[in-house]
Amino acid sequence: MQQIVTFVFKNSYRLLFLLLLFLSFILTVQFHSFHRSKVISSANFFTGGVYERVNSISEYLRLKDQNNQLAIENARLKMLLFNVKDSTLAPRLDSIKGVKKVNIIVSKVIHNAYNTHENYLTINSGSAQGIQSDMGVINSAGIIGIIDKTSENYASIISILNVKSQINAKIKKTNHFGSLVWNGKSTGFVQLIDVPRLASVHKGDTIVTGGQSVIFPENIGIGTIDKIYIDNQTNYYTLNVKLFNDMTNLGHVYIIKSKDRDEIINLEKPVNE
Amino acid sequence: MSSAVFVNFARFLLLFIAQIMLFNNINLFGYINPYPYVLFIILYPVNGNKTALLLASFLLGICLDMFCNSGGVHALASIILAYFRPALFRFSFGLSYEYQTVKLNDVLTPERFTFLLLAVAMHHFTLFFLEVFRLNFLWEILLKTFLTTLFTLLLCISIIYIIKPSRR
């Protein structure tokens, strides 16, 4: 017993090092696994509060860009409004599923990151505003990511510029599905993989969300095809997609809360267990 | 003695604040951020309490991880640097570094530069390796380590020169 005590005292420095090493290694491994730890995340009140302060200053520098974006979006919406040809020809909403399927919560990005392989954003609304994990996040140009962790007033988002994110997407013209991933190289481009060879793809075609999940509704813009590769191993297309969004400059975002969400999740629950 | 504690505490706080508010938002070429917070570990007194340094490095790293959303990456890289600091001292200043009072925040000599370079490179390689955690990105890790080390080194040297304690 005494030998153990003397050993611990003699090597206390080394043991402390090993303990801390072990602790931070666990945290690192946890960070790379799909379910991240809740404590070390920027969605807590302390980091969220600091980022909100910092952002309130840097926000002024981006006001012009943000105004431009909003004006463009307004113009697009006005165009849709004025150009409805005939109200009787307007597409009928699906009356079985209910008219309003989606709720939108507006929020603001207070911390943006795009310099690592696994990027997370922080926004200034959380569970108090009705935000939960796995909700889709978009802005006026296109998709941004998926909610990861929430605290009362803040939430972190897995950006689409994260090698772990995988989002169902399709080619708008032909309805062929694929998975949207990021290879970690450029902030302006993501990759659509596993597109069947039957699909006729052309440079410049639009990629939109697929609507096979409860996270994003269908037909939200993602980007346009920039380059087409054929994967030698699988013989599927891999498409380089140029994003509509400038992920390095984000302001206001919309969080999509599908009203069917709880119902669908409940429905799928017994199947998974 | 208490003034040394105060100086280190102030350095900890200032470097931490500067890191999250300023240096984390630089994004040179889209992805290069310098990490001059390692200066805290580098400039810690040579004969200071080693256990305190280890704990302080861990705390500094874990706080940064919280802000960067990066798990325990900064914490691990920081404690590795803190633990191997004496070995780096021995390598760059010779075996008897503890007896000749090594002062780092002073005019740049080849020994000091070697130490700074090794310390920063070691920290950054550990950091980026753990941050990516995939071997198929090895070249990108090395490139990022190289570029960021240059950037951080430049910043560290300028910071040392700017806030060099005035003597005479």
Image (cartoon, rainbow, N blue to C red):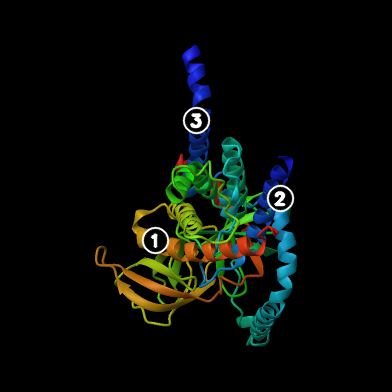
Give the residue drawn at x 65%, y 55%. B15
Chain of the residue under the numbered disc 3 shown in the image:
A
**In this orientation, which residue lies closer to the viewer: A129 or B55?**
B55
User: Do marks 3 and 1 share a chain?
Assistant: no
Chain of the residue under the numbered disc 1 shown in the image:
B
Q: Position of residue A140 (x, y in %)?
A: 62, 74
Which residue carries the number 1 mark? B142
Query: Relative to B58, is B33 above or below?
Result: below
Q: Is mark 1 on a helix, strand or loop?
A: helix
Q: Is mark 2 on a helix, strand or loop?
A: helix
Q: How crowded is mark 3: few (under 14 residues within 10 Å), some or many (20 or more)?
A: some
Q: How crowded is mark 2: few (under 14 residues within 10 Å), some or many (20 or more)?
A: few
CB within 8 Å, label 3 to label 1: no
Q: Could you say which quadrant of the image residue A255 lies in? A: bottom right
Q: How far apart are marks 2 and 3 (CA)?
A: 28 Å
User: Do marks 2 and 3 share a chain?
Assistant: no
Regarding residue B8, the answer to whether it shows in the image is yes
Q: Where is residue A20 in the image (x, y as percent from the top left)?
A: 53, 37
Give the residue drawn at x 37%, y 78%. A227
Instruction: Name the residue at the front extreme.
Output: B168
Q: Which of marks 2 and 1 is nearer the N terminus?
A: 2
Query: Relative to A171, is A167 above or below?
Result: above
Image depth: mark 2 or mark 1 in front: 2
Which residue carries the number 2 mark? B10
Q: Could you say which quadrant of the image residue A156 lies in? A: bottom right
Q: Distance between the residues labelled 2 and 1?
A: 33 Å
